[in-house]
Image: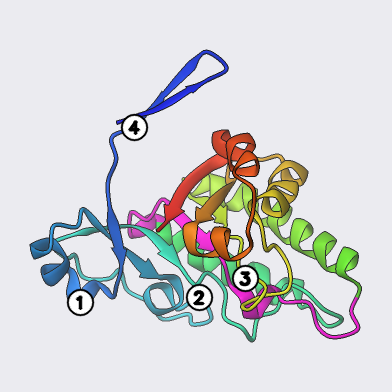
């Protein structure tokens, strides 16, 4: 599918369409014409647990997972436990690679939300720091993290593609890219110009 021309380069992709669903519903999803399933990282990889087995193969591939971080494992705020976060992400990324998952969605509004009274610029630096630490680990496992902007009703930071891109550029690592979700994009009334600028870094889309 030809997406258009930008800076004299033609962007062309073999478009696939997936559905966010438990892997147990893969048969129904396949019958409905979906190409893949987007699973749930917390359910599939149990990053806080030491005992884990590769999920049983299903009739559809699961190349993408969302819900990267549980709400209790906060990356923003006055009491962030970097060691616990890093241990969790090491488990998740290693298990993602073993499960042939290549993309993890960083929405996780509860984990990244800014507490009342906490400085937003400090929170933004904490998110960038987390992603900078995690990017090389993700890269070593062949996994790309895509930052998902969430509208203000769900989270109070990284609400637009433009804001997500400030973190992509600050981290400056190929393992950290951007996602656009049409639902959040339109709720935030974000201008299409922001999407056009971000296109080279948009690696996953929610519709």
Which residue in the structure is indicated by mark 4?
Answer: 13
Q: Quadrant of residue 193?
A: top right
Image spot of residue 13 (x, y percent): 34, 32
Disc 4 or disc 1, which is closer to the eye? 4
Give the spatial CA distance, label 4 vs label 2: 32 Å
| Front disc: 4 or 3 | 4
Please indicate, yes or no, whether residue 14 appears anywhere in the rendered image: yes
- Which secondary structure, mark 1? helix
Dots 4, 2 in contact, CB < 8 A: no
Mark 2, residues whose alpha carbon is within 10 Å: few (<14), some, or many (≥20)? many
**Within 10 Å of the Cα at label 4, are there few (<14), some (14-19), or many (20+) other Cα atoms?**
few
Query: Magenta segment: does it hold 73?
Result: no
Numbered badge on residue 87: 3
Spatial distance from mark 1 to mark 2, Cα to Cα? Answer: 20 Å
Q: Which residue is mark 2?
A: 47
Front tag of 4 and 2: 4
User: Where 46 falls versus 190 (above or below)?
Assistant: below
Q: Secondary structure at mark 4?
A: loop
User: In which quadrant of the rendered view does residue 75 lie?
Assistant: bottom right
| Structural distance between the alpha carbons of marks 3 and 2 | 8 Å
Query: CB atoms at circles 3 and 2 under 8 Å apart?
Result: no
Q: Which residue is mark 1?
A: 24
Where, quadrant-wise, is the N terminus in this rendering? top left
The tag earlier along the polypeptide, 3 or 1, is: 1
**Residues in magenta?**
97-118
Disc on the earlier residue, 4 or 1:
4
Residue occupying the point 83% across, 68% down: 123
């Amino acid at each position: 599918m030809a997406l258009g021309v930008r800076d004299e380069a033609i962007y062309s992709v073999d478009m696939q369409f997936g559905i966010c669903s438990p892997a147990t519903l893969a048969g129904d999803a396949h019958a409905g014409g979906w190409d893949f399933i987007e699973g749930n990282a917390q359910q599939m990889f149990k990053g806080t647990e030491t005992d884990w087995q590769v999920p049983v193969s299903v009739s559809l591939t699961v190349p993408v997972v969302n819900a990267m971080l549980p709400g209790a494992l906060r990356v923003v705020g006055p009491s962030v436990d970097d060691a616990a976060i890093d241990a969790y992400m090491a488990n998740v990324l290693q298990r993602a690679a073993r499960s042939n998952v290549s993309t993890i969605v960083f929405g996780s509004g509860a984990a990244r939300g800014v507490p009342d009274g906490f400085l937003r610029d400090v929170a933004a630096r904490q998110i960038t720091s987390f992603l900078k630490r995690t990017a090389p680990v993700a890269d070593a496992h062949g996994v790309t993290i895509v930052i998902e902007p969430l509208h203000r009703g769900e989270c109070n930071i990284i609400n637009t593609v433009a804001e997500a891109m400030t973190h992509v550029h600050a981290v400056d690592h190929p393992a950290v890219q951007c996602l656009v979700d049409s639902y959040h994009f339109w709720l935030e009334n974000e201008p299409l110009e922001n999407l056009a600028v971000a296109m080279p870094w948009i690696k996953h889309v929610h519709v």
